[in-house]
Image: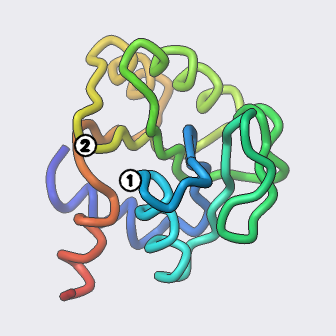
Amino acid sequence: MNREAIGAILSKSRTIAVVGLSDNPARPSHQVAGYLQRAGYRIIPVNPHVTRVHGETAVASLREVPGPVDVVLIFRRPEHVPAIVEDAIAIGARAVWMQSGIRHSAAAARARAAGLAVVEDACMMVEHRMRAGG
Protein backbone atom coordinates (compact mmCIF):
# COMPACT_ATOMS: atom_id res chain seq x y z
CA MET A 1 0.00 0.00 0.00
CA ASN A 2 1.33 3.40 -0.86
CA ARG A 3 1.99 6.21 1.59
CA GLU A 4 -0.89 8.31 0.32
CA ALA A 5 -3.37 5.48 0.95
CA ILE A 6 -2.00 4.96 4.47
CA GLY A 7 -2.35 8.68 5.11
CA ALA A 8 -5.96 8.56 3.92
CA ILE A 9 -6.78 5.71 6.32
CA LEU A 10 -5.19 7.58 9.22
CA SER A 11 -6.88 10.90 8.45
CA LYS A 12 -10.38 9.61 7.63
CA SER A 13 -10.70 7.00 10.38
CA ARG A 14 -12.08 7.64 13.86
CA THR A 15 -12.96 4.20 15.27
CA ILE A 16 -10.41 1.39 15.46
CA ALA A 17 -11.30 -2.14 16.57
CA VAL A 18 -8.06 -3.60 17.94
CA VAL A 19 -8.16 -7.39 17.56
CA GLY A 20 -5.87 -9.10 20.05
CA LEU A 21 -5.53 -6.03 22.30
CA SER A 22 -3.84 -7.07 25.54
CA ASP A 23 -4.37 -5.52 28.96
CA ASN A 24 -0.66 -6.12 29.67
CA PRO A 25 1.17 -2.73 29.43
CA ALA A 26 4.33 -4.50 28.22
CA ARG A 27 2.63 -5.84 25.07
CA PRO A 28 2.94 -3.92 21.79
CA SER A 29 -0.83 -4.01 21.25
CA HIS A 30 -1.38 -2.21 24.56
CA GLN A 31 1.21 0.44 23.76
CA VAL A 32 -0.01 1.07 20.21
CA ALA A 33 -3.69 1.23 21.20
CA GLY A 34 -2.88 3.63 24.04
CA TYR A 35 -0.98 5.88 21.67
CA LEU A 36 -3.84 5.84 19.14
CA GLN A 37 -6.36 6.63 21.86
CA ARG A 38 -4.26 9.58 23.04
CA ALA A 39 -4.04 10.72 19.40
CA GLY A 40 -7.83 11.04 19.33
CA TYR A 41 -9.04 7.74 17.91
CA ARG A 42 -11.76 5.71 19.59
CA ILE A 43 -10.41 2.23 20.28
CA ILE A 44 -12.49 -0.87 20.81
CA PRO A 45 -10.64 -3.79 22.43
CA VAL A 46 -11.46 -7.12 20.75
CA ASN A 47 -10.25 -9.96 22.94
CA PRO A 48 -12.33 -12.66 24.69
CA HIS A 49 -9.78 -12.84 27.52
CA VAL A 50 -10.01 -9.25 28.81
CA THR A 51 -12.86 -7.08 30.08
CA ARG A 52 -11.43 -3.55 29.82
CA VAL A 53 -8.35 -1.98 28.26
CA HIS A 54 -7.51 1.73 28.31
CA GLY A 55 -10.87 2.40 29.97
CA GLU A 56 -12.80 0.81 27.10
CA THR A 57 -15.04 -2.24 27.46
CA ALA A 58 -13.74 -5.21 25.49
CA VAL A 59 -15.81 -7.41 23.22
CA ALA A 60 -15.06 -11.06 22.46
CA SER A 61 -15.24 -10.78 18.67
CA LEU A 62 -15.54 -8.22 15.89
CA ARG A 63 -19.13 -9.22 15.28
CA GLU A 64 -19.97 -8.01 18.80
CA VAL A 65 -18.66 -4.49 18.25
CA PRO A 66 -21.46 -1.97 18.77
CA GLY A 67 -21.62 0.55 15.96
CA PRO A 68 -19.50 1.20 12.89
CA VAL A 69 -15.76 0.49 12.65
CA ASP A 70 -13.39 2.32 10.34
CA VAL A 71 -10.28 0.18 10.81
CA VAL A 72 -9.75 -3.35 12.08
CA LEU A 73 -6.23 -3.34 13.53
CA ILE A 74 -4.89 -6.88 13.82
CA PHE A 75 -2.49 -8.07 16.52
CA ARG A 76 -2.91 -11.80 15.91
CA ARG A 77 -0.73 -14.40 14.22
CA PRO A 78 -1.13 -14.71 10.44
CA GLU A 79 -3.09 -17.97 10.65
CA HIS A 80 -5.91 -16.06 12.41
CA VAL A 81 -6.07 -13.28 9.81
CA PRO A 82 -8.50 -14.92 7.29
CA ALA A 83 -11.26 -15.31 9.90
CA ILE A 84 -10.67 -11.75 11.15
CA VAL A 85 -10.92 -10.42 7.59
CA GLU A 86 -14.23 -12.24 7.11
CA ASP A 87 -15.53 -10.63 10.30
CA ALA A 88 -14.24 -7.22 9.17
CA ILE A 89 -16.13 -7.61 5.89
CA ALA A 90 -19.27 -8.75 7.72
CA ILE A 91 -19.34 -5.70 10.01
CA GLY A 92 -18.71 -3.25 7.17
CA ALA A 93 -15.24 -2.06 8.22
CA ARG A 94 -13.52 0.26 5.76
CA ALA A 95 -9.96 -1.02 6.27
CA VAL A 96 -7.93 -3.90 7.65
CA TRP A 97 -4.50 -3.08 9.09
CA MET A 98 -2.06 -5.89 9.93
CA GLN A 99 0.55 -4.74 12.42
CA SER A 100 4.31 -5.13 11.95
CA GLY A 101 5.29 -8.71 11.21
CA ILE A 102 1.80 -9.75 10.12
CA ARG A 103 1.06 -10.59 6.49
CA HIS A 104 -1.48 -12.81 4.77
CA SER A 105 -1.68 -12.33 1.02
CA ALA A 106 -4.84 -14.40 0.44
CA ALA A 107 -6.73 -12.63 3.25
CA ALA A 108 -5.49 -9.27 1.98
CA ALA A 109 -6.76 -10.10 -1.52
CA ARG A 110 -10.12 -11.17 -0.07
CA ALA A 111 -10.42 -7.88 1.84
CA ARG A 112 -9.51 -5.82 -1.23
CA ALA A 113 -12.02 -7.74 -3.35
CA ALA A 114 -14.68 -6.80 -0.79
CA GLY A 115 -13.72 -3.13 -1.09
CA LEU A 116 -11.63 -2.71 2.05
CA ALA A 117 -8.32 -0.86 2.13
CA VAL A 118 -5.52 -3.13 3.34
CA VAL A 119 -2.22 -2.47 5.08
CA GLU A 120 0.15 -5.34 5.85
CA ASP A 121 3.25 -5.50 8.02
CA ALA A 122 3.21 -1.89 9.24
CA CYS A 123 2.86 -0.29 12.66
CA MET A 124 -0.09 2.07 12.83
CA MET A 125 1.56 4.04 15.63
CA VAL A 126 4.78 4.52 13.65
CA GLU A 127 2.84 5.57 10.54
CA HIS A 128 0.75 8.03 12.55
CA ARG A 129 3.83 9.51 14.26
CA MET A 130 5.53 10.04 10.88
CA ARG A 131 2.53 12.06 9.70
CA ALA A 132 2.08 13.90 12.98
CA GLY A 133 5.72 14.96 13.02
CA GLY A 134 6.65 13.25 16.22
Marks 2 and 1 sit apart, C-alpha to C-alpha, by 10 Å
Expressed as whole percent of the image width and height from the top left, the position of residue 112 reads 38, 28
Q: Is residue 53 above or below residue 37?
A: above
Q: Give the left or right position of residue 23, taking residue 48 as reference.
A: left
> Residue drawn 45% across and 52% down?
29
Amino acid type, callout 1: Pro
Q: Mark 1 points at which residue?
A: 28
Q: Could you tell me if the residues under marks 2 and 1 are in contact, i.e. CB atoms within 8 Å? A: yes
Q: What number is the disc on residue 79?
A: none
Question: Which quadrant is home to the C terminus?
Answer: bottom left
Q: Name the residue under label 2.
A: 100
Mark 1 or mark 2, which is nearer the start of the sequence? 1
Q: How crowded is mark 2: few (under 14 residues within 10 Å), some or many (20 or more)?
A: some
Amino acid type, callout 2: Ser
Q: How is the image coloured?
A: rainbow
Q: Which of 93 and 33 is in front in this view?
A: 33
Tell me the quarter of the picture where residue 131 sits.
bottom left
Q: How crowded is mark 1: few (under 14 residues within 10 Å), some or many (20 or more)?
A: some
